[in-house]
Every structure is written in structure tokens, then in C-alpha cells.
Image: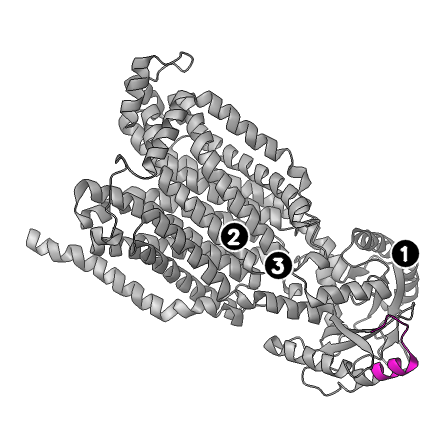
Amino acid sequence: MNSTRQPIRWLIPLVLVVVWLGLGGAFGSYAGKLGEVSTNDQAAFLPQNAESTRVVEEQAAFDQQESLPAIVIWTTNDGSKVSEAQLSAATGALQSLVGTDGVEGRPSPAFRSQDGLALQGVVPLGTDLGDELAVALEEIEVAASKVPDTRIQLAGPAATQRDLGKAFAGIDGLLLGVALAAVLIILLLVYRSVLLPFVIIISSVFALGVAGAIVYVLADHDVVRVDGQVQGILSILVIGAATDYALLLTARFREELAHSGDRTAAAWASLRGSFGAITASAATVALGLLALLLSDLANNQALGPVGAIGIVCAVLTTLTFLPAVLALMGRVAFWPAKPRSVDAESGGHGVWRKVARWVDRRPRQLLMASTGFLLLGAAFFPALQSKGVPLDELFVNDAPSVAAQQTLGKHFPGGSGQPAVVIAGAEDLAAVRAAAAGTPGVAGAQVVAGTSDGQPLVVDGRVRIDAVLKDAPDSDAAKQTIDDLRDRLHATAADTRVGGYTAQQVDTQRTAEHDKNVIIPVVLAIILVILIVLLRSLLLPLLLVATVGLNYLTTLGIAGLVFEHGFGFSGTDASVPLYGFVFLVALGVDYNIFLMSRVREETLRLGTRQGMLRGLIATGGVITSAGVVLAATFAALIVIPLAFLAQIAFIVAFGVLLDTLVVRSLLVPALVRAIGPAVWWPSRMGRAIAREHPEPAHTQPFTQNQKAEVKASID
């Protein structure tokens, strides 16, 4: 029988490795192809039920040729007023673009600013240019440069979209390369092994390739929408999660291999021992991400299933490909290092024995100190302003479209190029236009004409009015003007709707606030249920959720201070706190699951006190390594020069490190140590443990004999 089973022991791992090599070869390139099916058109991700979104739908009927406007701005080289000759040359330059590839319809004539120091013109471009958008804008710049003694800048949606395209240009190669390099360096330092880090990275790349292929097909069939932000987060999330799960499994494999010496048996034992923790951890993240489907923001809805697909693929490679490779390689995987037991006198284990002794001797002091530190940081939570990112802070570096928008706002009304779009009934045109023009903060209201004689364009009994705002379109004053404009126009004609860029910002911010109130309780409930099922306790899951929630508030409080006083951000995107919550709470619970599932296993044998201490020693090194890896992978998002991703990178990286080094290492162990067996309430396990393994009194100081006993039990 043994001779029959022996080949089978090697056959299963070999087949799994071959299957994954085939999947990696077939789908590995898809992670780099997502740009082909992604869109950076921000209008595609507006709140589904907002007034500004309905305006976008109605507005399309008034565009005889749907277009993406590029705003050309001329200022004189010496800062003087523009001349008649320059005005005439600018108009001629604009008209020369008729028939140019990418230009839809006829550009507007050039017109002066009120101060006479600048000229402005609008060139309508096609909305489906893709990579050709940059070429079309270069053609505009060439034509505009024929106006003598002037400096040319391009603003408007087309210019912003070009800059976004440039920002996301490195998302396929640079971002992934930086993330993988960071992971490789950390793994080499952790394992001091040449082969194992590459095995783990290959496993994560296979997961990303399969996830990319699935998302590519879904996006190509319009099942999900993907933009550069979702694409970048998918890459980072899969690499980070797959590496974290791999660290947990390989640490268990190293432990089992040191005890038994049989690589196949060690692989199966490590799979059995870590399966529950890995699947439970993955479930918290995947279900937390899927809760984003409850959002009314389309980009949140897109991230939910895309991220969940990535997590599932990360789990699949970790539980199939990785143990198969370990079973085939055995000790060779750790070469030139040798696998050692967690009780060995080496490496980081000595550090975690010291931490465990500290927790055992002073649980209440540690509990108070760590909680106080977190509460102090959480007190600054109101400092994080989530009112949206101004246009001049949208990009981390200097973007041409931002500088152009600033020039536009300096010489023309602040809302030039981004008017409020009003859609009203034709019968209410006069009243609505008068009410719009008379609203404080509105510089003027112009009816969109349909004929050369200036008659209003009427579509299905509706007309369009463009209201130019006095203030910059991303300013608080402009947002207040939108609220005032809506109040006036709704009172004038109930079926009037107000949209445009500023209105979209207002609606997005309010929708994000609503989403937080809906999604955060759902995510907390999901995590709580998973923890209750895994730990078979009620009190402990409640305490764990409370600790990661406190970590989230502390992280956002410190982030608010750093963003304002360190990075110079005046605010964050409205979705940043929600993204931060989903990632930090779900991933923070991950580390508590890794820790407490091992603690429960040890507790069943040794009691709560020694179970907590031995669990901390056994998992301390691997969980800290996992936290550093995840923080490093999310920090890689800073290579994409967008404020949104830079803010997410800081929040997740800092929050994960805080959770790993303070919450999981000190706060949770001290909490469990201080409470004792009652922490497993209402499980019978707690009562049984209390009878079989009575805990020492916490209120009495340790005698020399007790100290020696504690040291010996931990060692």
C-alpha cells in the first residue's frame, strides 16, 4: 500500500504546479492589458441617482455631435493686453482646425477676457479618441502657436483627461515593478533564502494574471467598469494579499518541516493548520469589498467585485500552487537557511518571547498605554476634511491642465470652461434664465442656440442654459452657488435640473457621505459574523472589531494632520475615508484572525494565558512581516502622481503598520491576558479552560518563582 501511495503523494503537487504554470502562461499578460478596457472618463463614475447625473443624460441630446471640449488660452509674453491682430490670429488658428483628425464640429471664435490680458477659445474633440487624444491636443497647440508673441495653455476636460492618461501610463509596468521589488527585498530579509521569495512572488503574479483575465473579460462585456484607480488598487491588493497569505502558510510549513522532516506531510499539515485563518481572512476582505456594491457611486461599485475577484485568486494560488511547490521542494525552498521551530533560539523569535513576557507581566499597563496612544491619535479625526480635492491638488506633481485652469480663472470668471448646465422646460425658459442670471455667484446665463439666428435649441420640449459661475468650479463658494441655484430654479420650475462639473462634485460628496453611513455598518456586521464563526465566541469578536475600529479612527486622525501640515492637501476625495475603512478594517481583522486562530489552537491545549503567549510568539514574526509587506505594496501607489492614490497609500500603509505593531502586538494580547478565560464567552471552552488551567491572579505581584515559571513556560 505504501508503494502505491508514494507516487500519488508526488503526483498531486506536480499536477497542481503544472496546471498553474499553464494558467500563468495563458493569462499572465492580462494584468497589463486592463488599460485596453479601462476608462478615465470621470462622467462614467458619477452617482447613479443624482441630479447632475440625470443632467448628463439629458445634456447628450443637446450635443448635435457629442464632444470633449479643449479650452485654448492665450496670454501675451510680456503681460500686456492682447491686440486686435492677436485676437484675429487666434480666431483664424481655431478655424484652421476644422477637419483636423479628432476635431468634432467647428471651434468657437476667440474672445477677450474682461481685463484684456487673455484670449479664450473652445475646440470640441471626439469622445472616443483614446490614445489619439494626445495627438489631437498637440495639433491644437501647433495651430494655436501661430498667434505671435503669446503663450498657449490648454484647459478643460480634454486637457485634464490627457494628464490623467499620462499619470496612469505607468500603472501597468512601473507600479507593478515597484511593488514586486519591495516585496522581494522584504522577503529576502525575512527568510534569508534565495528561492522562497521568488516562489511567493510567482504565486502572487499567477493570482494577478488570472484575476486580470477575469476582470478583462467582464469589463470588455460591460459587466464591470474599470478606471486607472481601480486597476492600480487591484494590482496592489492582489500582490499584497497573496504575499500575506503565503507568509502565513510558509511559516507554518517551516514549523511543521522542522518538527517532522517530511516535506509532503509538512505541506499538508501547514495547509490544514492555516486553511481556516487564510479563508476567514480572505472572506472578510472579499465580503467587505463586495459591500461597496451598496454604494451609489459607480467607481465604488466597480472596485467591489474587481477587488473581490483579486482576493479569491490570491487565496486559490496560496492554497493550491504554493503548498504544491513546497511539497516538491521541501528544505530546498529555504536554502541557504535551514527551517527551524518557533521555539528555536534564533532570529525574531527572541524578540517575540520578550514581548510575550512583557504582555504576561504587565497586561493592564500595556492595555492602558496602547489604548491611550490610539485615543490620542483618534482625537484628531475631525482634522481630515473629505470635502473633495481641488483641481490644483488633483495631481501630486505640476500638471499642465491645472496651471491652465488657474490662468483661466485669473482672467475669466472662475467657472469659465466648467459652466453649470441647466436643463429646463421650453415653456419656462425666460423665467429660468432670469432666475439663473440673478442668482448670487452666477456671472451670466447663456441659452444654447440651435440656429444661426440665435433661437434656442429645443429637444423634446427641453432647453439648455449654461450658467457661468464667478468662482473657481472646485471652490466652496461655487458649491454653495450650486445649492442656491438649485433652490431658486426648483422653486421657479420644479422639473428644472442643474448639473455640470461643480454640481457633480456636490452630488458625489453627498453620495459618499450617504455611502459611509450604509456601508460601514454592513462591513462591521460581516466581519463580526466571520469572527464569531471562526472563534466560536461573542465577546472576543466584539473586542477585536472595536480595536480595528479604533485603529481606523487613529489612522485618519494622524492622516488629517499629515495631509494638511506635511503634504499640503486641503482635503481628500470624498471616497477616501470609505476606502480607508474597507481596507484598514478588513485587513486589520486579517492580522487578528491570524493571531487569534493560532491562540485558540494553543489555548485548547495549554489554557488562555499560555495559549495567548505561545500564539503571539508563533505568529509575531510572520504577521509583522506580512504587515510590512502589505504596507510596502500599498505605498507603491505613490508612483502614480494622483492625490487620491497618494492619500490611500498613506492611510493604508500607516494604518497597517499601526495595526501590526501596536494593536495586534500589544493591545489585543494585553486585552486577552487581562480578561483571561472569560474572553471566550459564551463558549463552554472558556469555562472548561478556567477549570483545567486556572489563571494566576493579576492583582498580585509576581514572586521570583512565578517569574521563573513564566519564563520557562514561554521558552
On whether residue 445 falls in the magenta region, the answer is no
- The location of residue 227, given as percent across then percent down, is 57, 64
Q: Give the range drawn in magenta.
A: 77-91
Q: In this view, does 350 lie above or below 432?
A: above
Identify the image's colour scheme: rainbow, by chain, secondary structure or one colour: one colour
Residue carrying label 1? 439
User: What distance separates the C-alpha of mark 2 from that of mark 3?
Assistant: 13 Å
Residue lying at 61% horizontally and 34% vertically, measured from the top left: 378
Q: Residue 193 carries which label?
A: none
Residue lying at 89% horizontally and 75% vertically, measured from the top left: 82
User: What distance separates the C-alpha of mark 1 from that of mark 3?
Assistant: 34 Å
Q: Which mark is residue 635?
A: 2
In which quadrant of the rendered view does residue 594 lie? Answer: top left
Q: How many marks?
A: 3
Q: Which of marks 1 and 3 is in front?
A: 3
- First in sequence: mark 2 or mark 3? 2
> Callout 1: few (<14), some (14-19), or many (20+) C-alpha neighbours within 10 Å?
many
- First in sequence: mark 1 or mark 3? 1
In the picture, measured across the screen, residue 612 lies left or right of residue 425, that is: left
Residue carrying label 3? 642
